[in-house]
Image: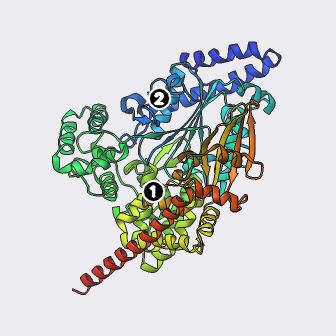
């Protein structure tokens, strides 16, 4: 049996014993749930997180707090103290953390888990939302199986009684990794669970663009880029582990040069900063693009990767006999296939099957087990996490995918960008900005012509511009806009808290191009009069979704299904119609300017080819 630490026992007993007194009629079930389920679960994850692998330390697990750097997150008012969980939840039980690829969200979740145990605050439960994409049961059952490790569990009724007391901290990780086809179902399931068991605490993480802001209860917090001081502290902390003080000084000196100031936007990402630290001995100059960061990493891993943690230039033996270029091509195809299938973690069967198919198609000769050995051990571009394999960071998978696409013929690129790229939204719920940035760097003309411009033109064709009313209605219909709001029974005030929309590719493109942001269309940004309140709350327009504690009702204003002239006049009178018209106007201007830009670049390229 697993050895249980004193910290874990103290945490479980702190919540188990009072609950036994409270639920004395089901005492045996409560004891079984905690002693044969939660106790082992918490200890298992505690051990897993206390020793961790990072991008810099991929070959061996290190003490978590030897490498963890406390990132900064802020809500609309203030900086959040991530070391005091009680303070984090002093005003709300529901928080979403929005951050770009490589901003440190996963490390933050590990820190919050360990801190919750240490501070005996709540029982932390980690839910990796991507795993629900292939789960056929209910969200509640997934929670039950996670906590009990699929052992004989109490009935749903008994588990519900335990959850209703609010002793848990649910860490919902990776909302952007929910498949778009599962978005509505799983989002509703998360809402229903958080509503029903609202005495518990919830943190949800996501990349931007996944519409995590749509959850009405959740307060949005955003991961802030590393400041100049934090960049220095982060570098010193990572290299302190391997006693490389002189290397840290050299890196900081390069970063602080006035001519490198423009690259701080890259180094403000913990991931890209880690990449620069890893590759510094081989590539001491700051790359001008993200894609160059990734290439430097791959080249360093293939040639000198062990010099970071081992002295004397030690290198692992390569047993597949494949050249770096051949391994790179295998990684490109594997990344492309797995990313477009929505897989970011790979079991042994999946990895073997895909790699075998790739080396057969590329007519390469090597044993699968030797190739996997080189990927995992010699190069360490794939790491083992429990029983699964994965890239040290998902963004590496995105880099190799972008690299593969950029190497294809014009005809193949057009098929990928105009067709298959849209399919990617099936396997992500937004959050593709990093991939797009890499494609834009490596394949500027084709990416903008066949993906960005293609989608913008298709969107414009979907908008009926024969009149202002038709434009507004067609926009709302295409986007699937709904407005959510709360109203307390004893108050006339409406609190607009969320917007819902389809989350299609065009939504993310509009935000990516900084043309506009759908969150600005929330009615909370407009002045709503008492007369408007009465209109919105009329049964014809507002659909009551649920009632909490019989004192507060959540409503949905479904523009499309409730559409009529009165609703249009309301949208027009508060200024929302003008905002939508302006947004469509900006899309038209972008189509025109981007078309001219692409044409000029193509002509310049033709001129150079004809020299």
Indicate the quadrant where residue 222 lies: top left
The tag on residue 433 is: 1
Above-or-below relation of 50 to 340: above
| Cα gap from disc 2 to disc 1, whole angstroms | 31 Å
How is the protein colored in the picture?
rainbow
Residue lying farthest right? 25
Q: Residue at x 73, y 25 (%)?
A: 162
Above-or-below relation of 71 to 595: above
How far across and how far down the image is residue 477, in percent? 65, 64
Which quadrant is the C terminus positioned in?
bottom left
Front-most of residues 249 and 357? 249
Q: Which residue is mark 2?
A: 50
Horizontally, is 254 left or right of 359 in the view? left
How far across and how far down the image is residue 409, in percent? 42, 78
Front-most of residues 400 and 158? 158
Above-or-below relation of 219 to 332: above
How far across and how far down the image is residue 433, in percent? 45, 56
How dense is the environment of label 2, judged by Cα within 10 Å: few (below 14), some, or many (20 and up)?
some
Residue lying farthest bottom? 610
The tag on residue 210 is: none
Q: Earlier in the sequence, mark 2 or mark 1?
A: 2
Q: Residue at x 32, y 54 (%)?
A: 302
Q: SS of the residue at dot 2? A: helix
Of badges 2 and 1, the one in the foreground is: 1
Q: Does residue 137 appear in the picture of this structure? A: no
């Amino acid at each position: 049996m697993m050895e249980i630490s004193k910290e874990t026992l103290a945490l479980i007993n702190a919540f188990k014993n009072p609950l036994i007194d409270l639920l004395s009629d089901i005492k045996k079930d409560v004891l079984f749930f905690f002693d044969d389920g939660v106790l082992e679960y918490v200890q298992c994850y505690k051990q897993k997180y206390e020793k961790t692998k990072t991008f810099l330390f991929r070959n061996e697990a290190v003490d978590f707090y030897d490498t963890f750097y406390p990132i900064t997150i802020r809500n609309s008012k203030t900086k959040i103290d991530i070391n005091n969980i009680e303070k984090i939840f002093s005003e709300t039980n529901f928080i979403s953390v929005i951050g770009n690829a490589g901003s440190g969200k996963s490390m933050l979740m590990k820190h919050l888990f360990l801190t919750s145990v240490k501070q005996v605050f709540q029982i932390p439960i980690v839910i990796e939302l991507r795993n629900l994409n292939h789960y056929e049961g209910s969200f509640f059952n997934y929670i039950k199986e996670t906590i009990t490790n699929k052992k004989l569990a109490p009935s749903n009724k008994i588990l519900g009684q335990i959850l209703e007391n609010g002793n848990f901290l649910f860490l919902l990780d990776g909302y952007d990794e929910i498949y778009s086809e599962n978005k509505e179902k799983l989002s509703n399931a998360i809402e229903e669970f958080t509503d029903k068991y609202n005495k518990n605490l919830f943190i949800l993480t996501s990349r931007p663009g996944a519409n995590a802001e749509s959850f009405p209860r959740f307060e949005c917090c955003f991961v802030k880029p590393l400041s100049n001081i934090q960049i220095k502290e982060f570098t010193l902390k990572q290299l302190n582990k391997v006693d490389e003080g002189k290397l840290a000084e050299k890196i900081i000196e390069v970063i602080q040069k006035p001519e490198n100031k423009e690259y701080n936007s890259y180094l403000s990402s913990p991931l890209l900063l880690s990449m620069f630290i890893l590759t510094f001995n081989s590539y001491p100059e700051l790359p001008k693009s993200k894609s160059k960061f990734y290439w430097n990493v791959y080249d360093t891993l293939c040639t000198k990767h062990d010099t970071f943690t081992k002295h004397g230039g030690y290198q692992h033996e390569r047993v597949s006999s494949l050249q770096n270029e051949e391994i790179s091509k295998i990684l490109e195809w594997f990344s492309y296939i797995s990313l477009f299938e929505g897989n970011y973690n790979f079991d042994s069967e999946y990895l073997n099957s895909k790699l075998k198919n790739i080396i057969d198609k590329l007519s390469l000769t090597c044993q699968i087990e030797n190739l996997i050995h080189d990927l995992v051990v010699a190069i360490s571009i794939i790491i083992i996490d429990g029983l699964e394999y994965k890239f040290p960071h998902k963004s590496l998978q995105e880099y190799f995918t972008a690299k593969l696409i950029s190497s294809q013929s014009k005809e193949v690129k057009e098929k990928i960008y105009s067709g298959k790229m849209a399919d990617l939204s099936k396997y992500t719920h937004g959050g593709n900005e990093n991939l797009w940035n890499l494609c834009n760097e490596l394949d500027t003309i084709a990416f903008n012509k066949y993906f960005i411009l293609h989608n913008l033109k298709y969107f414009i064709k979907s908008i009926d511009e024969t009149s202002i009313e038709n434009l507004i209605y067609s926009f709302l219909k295409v986007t699937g806009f709904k407005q959510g709001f709360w109203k307390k029974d004893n108050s006339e005030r409406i609190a607009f808290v969320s917007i819902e929309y389809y989350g299609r590719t065009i939504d993310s493109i509009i935000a990516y191009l900084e043309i506009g942001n759908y969150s600005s269309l929330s009615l909370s940004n407009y002045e709503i009069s008492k007369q408007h309140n009465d209109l919105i709350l009329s049964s014809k327009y507002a659909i009551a979704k649920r009632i909490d504690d019989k004192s507060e009702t959540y409503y949905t204003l479904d523009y499309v299904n409730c559409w009529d002239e009165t609703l249009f006049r309301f949208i027009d009178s508060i200024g929302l119609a003008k905002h939508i018209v302006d947004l469509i106007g900006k899309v038209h201007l972008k189509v025109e300017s981007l078309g001219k830009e692409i044409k000029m670049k193509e002509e310049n390229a033709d001129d150079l080819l004809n020299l």
